[in-house]
Image (spheres, coloured by chain):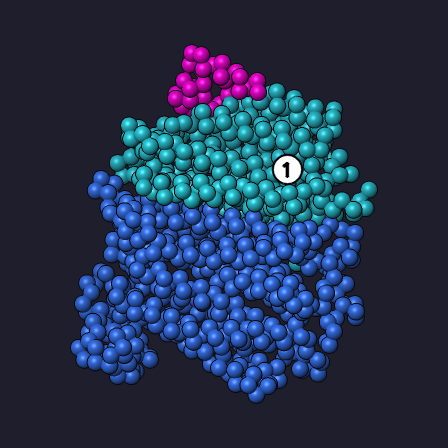
Amino acid sequence: MLASFDAVLLARIQFAFTVSFHFLFPAFTIGLASYLAVLNGLWLWTKDHKYLDLFRYWVKIFALAFAMGVVSGIVMSYQFGTNWSVFSDKAGPVIGAPMAYEVLSAFFLEAGFLGIMLFGRERVGPGLHMAATAAVAFGTFFSAFWILSVNSWMQTPAGFSIDPDTGQFLPENFWEIIFNPSFPYRLMHTVTAAYLTTAFIVGGVAAFHLLRRRRRGEAVSEATKTMFSMAMWMAAIVAPVQIFLGDLHGINTLEHQPAKVMAMEGHYESHDHGAPLYLFGIPNDETQTLDYAVGIPKLSSLILKHDLNAPLDGLDTIPDDEQPPVGIVFWSFRVMVAVGFAMLGIGAWSLWARWRGRLFEAPWLHRAALAMAPSGLIAVLAGWITTEVGRQPYTIYGMLRTAESAAPLDAAAVGTSLIAFIVVYFAVFGAGTFYIMRLMSRPPVFDEPRLKDVTKGPTRTAGITPAIEEAMRRPDAAHPGE
Amino acid sequence: MPIAEGVAFDLTFVWGFLIAFAVLIYVVLDGFDLGLGMLFAVEPERRHRDVMMNSVAPVWDGNETWLVLGGGGLFAAFPLAYALILPALYAPIIAMLLALIFRGVAFEFRWRTERWRGVWDVAFIGGSAVAALSQGIALGALLQGITIDKAARAYAGGWWDWLTPFSVTVGLAVMVGYMLLGATWLIMKTDGELQDRMRTRAWILGVATVAFIGAVSLWTPFLQEGYFVRWFAGTRIFLAVLVGAAVLGLAVLMFRALHVHRHDYWPFMLALAMFGLCFVGLGICMFPYIVPTEVTLWEAAAPYRSQLFMIIGAGILIPIILAYTGYAYWVFRGKVDPEAGYH
């Protein structure tokens, strides 16, 4: 029994590890694909060269991030079978279909047009190139649509029956399965998070170049200014929307997964006349208490029920073996919310600086934006941990336990593969992150030379190669105004 | 089995066909990508490696997506088979996934660094080789049969069952076959010195591929009684002879196209046809089983409602996918970098 528990635990760690790594890439590329489509469209519309320069700048980073997203995603698609085969057998009839739709409508669209987007500008003409860029952006959105539908169904299952012989989940109504109760909220909250993630990375990179130019006493290019301005508009508009969406999502979770919300809020005890919002506390699952709690009276009831005195149930109403681990959920939720409000602050700050006409002359705003560059990735991971750990001990909420979902695995096999994944992911994605950061450390340049112009070698327009870097060091390669 | 349920029978069959189709497309498309990656090992000159990689850079991602469709389709349409086969092939599948990571990132990373270029070249070669080998081993392990507990709907074998002389032979066969596809693809996409060398390699690889096809074909019928009956009982022996003769015929045509006519694209087309034929042979071997001689397509099938819901999307989307995939290949048609002065 102990051995089988170990295998399940190892499989859980493996899934959490591989999906956490994977999730970072789509969280970034969903927003970046749309940004690239907008830049491409603005270039076609205005013929202002700075948009093309920005497109060429970010498309290289996109190519790297997208490649890492693809290869880590393939791992996810097979891990259902290798490590969670019982779950696959049981849930396959229901969630297999939306996952197949993800492949058919999203992955092929992205992969099919990625080549044209990266390499095809000279080969297909501007209109078709724009269409290819848009197709990639739509592909990333469709992918989010389907995979979040599947994830939401596992959280709030609907539209199914159970086969009495095999224990399989059988589809009764695919409309109810896809548009299950938590799906609209989760989709909006996650896609918005992806847009914010990209906005803060783009804004952070622009802020880095604004600061560096300022320190060196050099003029800042229009491209860099536009990059910062667009990112800050995004932050100012979308961060408050995201907080509103998060509140809606929380209320929906309270309705369908109350134990998760209790863990998020640290409510071990029920509150009959308004529950406090705990700002701090150390969750203690042993004693079922929140130690050293600091709270604002009645605020939790106000947020969740929009009524100061509404009663709120606590984990004491949930059987012990159906409770999620509170500590992880409590803290990851707080990290997510804190980052969200910090994003809101940056957005508001940027509006004020813009109003004062000092958006590009505000070094402290730039420093804050630079510090916040990875904030979206942190919030996305924290939010994901909140929702996934918060649904434990179930893979299919209330229906199928995690411990009953795993493949009949040998602990040695899962352990070995787990170590292999950890080593390979840190080595490979560490190198990739380094290459991305190095690209980001360079400012966008005017009319970046193409490989064809500088060597007799083969054409590959998406890649900065050493030959191009050499050419870019020439003085005439600098952006006008830099 | 619910063969009597007319339409349901048809849909299961259609889904079996569709998944086999996705796997075949994957094998021939990513086959030449992976083969090309292995041929990197014997092509130390950097300018040649650049050309080789660029010949597949715009399309490899789409090629690999067929693997996801094969796996995802199996999960969706035959969840029981997915749940039985993947744990049985645990080690080769994990090895394949890790190898595909190295192979995939090499396409981007290789261009980002001068100092580490060699490392990513090795990652490209090693990733391609291990991916091909583990795919072949997985196929061999599936063909030789896996131990299952039918009542528990679970894999019941050991963690090293996949490793046998047969599965390793199939693994090597797939490596060599992929390299043949890669070499003939490069004959199509390049010219000059690189093309000449690929012609020589394609000749050696062609001979080796035919030898491996022969060895695996003669070995397979003796793995399971069912296979033997399927190929050699009564008049079926004519079918076996016919398929064998067809493979040999295609091989002769390929060698003629390679060295007599010195044609650019026919060798690749004929190598594809050889793979297609082997795949048909494999289908004859396995049908109607999805887990050979244990679980049939119909036993593993998802309910009719799931299959119906998916077939609507597949029916509309697969033709569209084939159309724009074809378009992408057409956009990047012709020799890689025709104007560059390599000669």
Residue sitting farthest toward the bottom:
A356
Horizontal and vertical percent position of residue A466: 72, 59
- In the figure, what tint was chain A given? blue
Of residues A355 and B243, the one drawn nearer to the viewer in this rendering: A355
- Compared with A397, A473 (above or below) is below
State which quadrant residue A228 falls in.
bottom right
- Compared with A204, B108 (above or below) is above
The crowd level at tag 1 (other Cα within 10 Å; few <14, some 14-19, many 20+) is many
Check if residue B63 falls in the magenta segment: no
Left or right, A428 with respect to A250, comes to right
Left or right, B21 with respect to A448, comes to left
Q: Which residues are magenta?
A: B218-246
Say which residue appears at 45% left-offset and 36% top-offset: B18
> Quick one: quadrant of the C terminus of chain B?
top right
Residue holding disc 1: B182
- Number of numbered discs visible in the structure rendering: 1
